[in-house]
Amino acid sequence: MQGPEPAARRAVKWLRRGELTVQRPPWIEKLRPLANAAGRVISAAALVAVVVYFVRTQVWRTVDLRDGRLCGVLLGSSLAYAAGEALMSYGWMRWLRSTGDRSVSMAAGIVLYCRSQLAKYIPGNVFHLVARQTLGNDLGAPHSALALASVSESAALVVAACALAGIGDGLPPGFPHVPRAAAFTFACLFLAAAVLFARFLQRSAPRRGFRGHALDTLLTLACYFPFFILNGVSLALLLSLSHSVGVRAAAELTGIWSLCWLAGYVTPGAPGGLGVREAALLYGLSATCSRPEAAAIAVEMRLVSTLGDVLLWLAATSLRHTIRKPAGSAA
């Protein structure tokens, strides 16, 4: 008489049939309230960081908010910034789905991503990633899949920024030291492309043909280009309030802003690229306008990005109660 089938063999059969479910240990379930509290603390700290930023920089003294045209451009640019990040949230969900995990619905993942963006203003520049890990795991996604989605997105952002930084004549003319800037740009592009290639070859993703997998990866990458293009248009609109800006100049400004964003993104510890991005933009606009004008535009672009993040957080927070959590998760 044959004895009972070993548990390991049963698990392999269940895995092949897609029937294996992992039961979380009780101590993990007990940590859910703590994780929820940590998410609320991160969100509150992000709001405080934004308020402190506005108070310390005294942005109202640099930007003339009595100018109706300027206010209109700032508001429209902030909405465009939020729209670009919303599209990025869809890209992040595509990365998460490509790992094979389906525990988080598309709507829940987008709301989660948009809520976490404000946490990047907390000193350290990593708490938006921490918030995604915490909130995503609360919705049932494993930490490994969430981390892989975030790493893939970081690489995609660098690829998009580097690609747009090279539009026009090689690199934007606002950066006179082209060899140094080119080396920085293409080094980041090479490293990010290597990460994406490794991600592309990952075996844990759903099995698809090479053509389908390549198309899916390209479509996901396409979700990140509008963010940079919209911000380049915003920069061109702000500059057009005092200078004549043509289509070619707008394309070059898109490249300048993409490179400035990249400098702030890869700088460790800079919350939201604060300071680094503005310094790079001041340098990048040196061949286009005077230094005081460049400084004012750099502050205005920071105002656009901060207000866009706040608007995105408010919209996502207002929708968070419509998202259903998986059974057994804490409220």
Image (cartoon, helix red, strand yellow):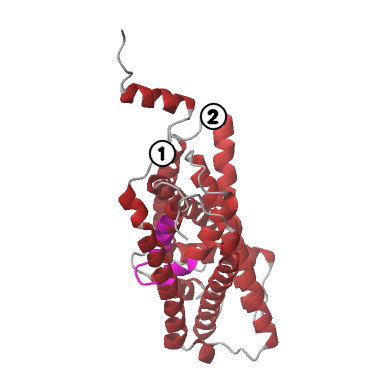
Above or below, 277 against 51 in this view is above
Above or below, 29 against 13 in this view is below
Q: Secondary structure at mark 1?
A: helix
Quadrant in the picture for residue 145: top left
Marking on residue 198: 1
Q: Nearer the viewer, residue 112 or 164?
A: 112
Q: Secondary structure at mark 2?
A: helix
Taking the spot 47% from the left edge, 61% from the top edge, the residue there is 331
Percent x, y for residue 308? 57, 71
Q: Is residue 223 visible?
A: no
Above or below, 240 against 315 in this view is below
Amino acid type, mark 1: Ala
Percent x, y for residue 317? 56, 68
Q: Nearer the viewer, residue 56 or 186?
A: 56
Quadrant in the picture for residue 167: bottom right
What range is drawn magenta here?
117-134
Is 22 left, or right, of 81 in this rendering?
A: left
Q: Is residue 308 visible?
A: yes
Q: Earlier in the sequence, mark 2 or mark 1?
A: 1
Is 304 left, or right, of 139 in this rendering?
A: right
Marking on residue 210: 2
Whether residue 130 appears in magenta in the rendering, the answer is yes
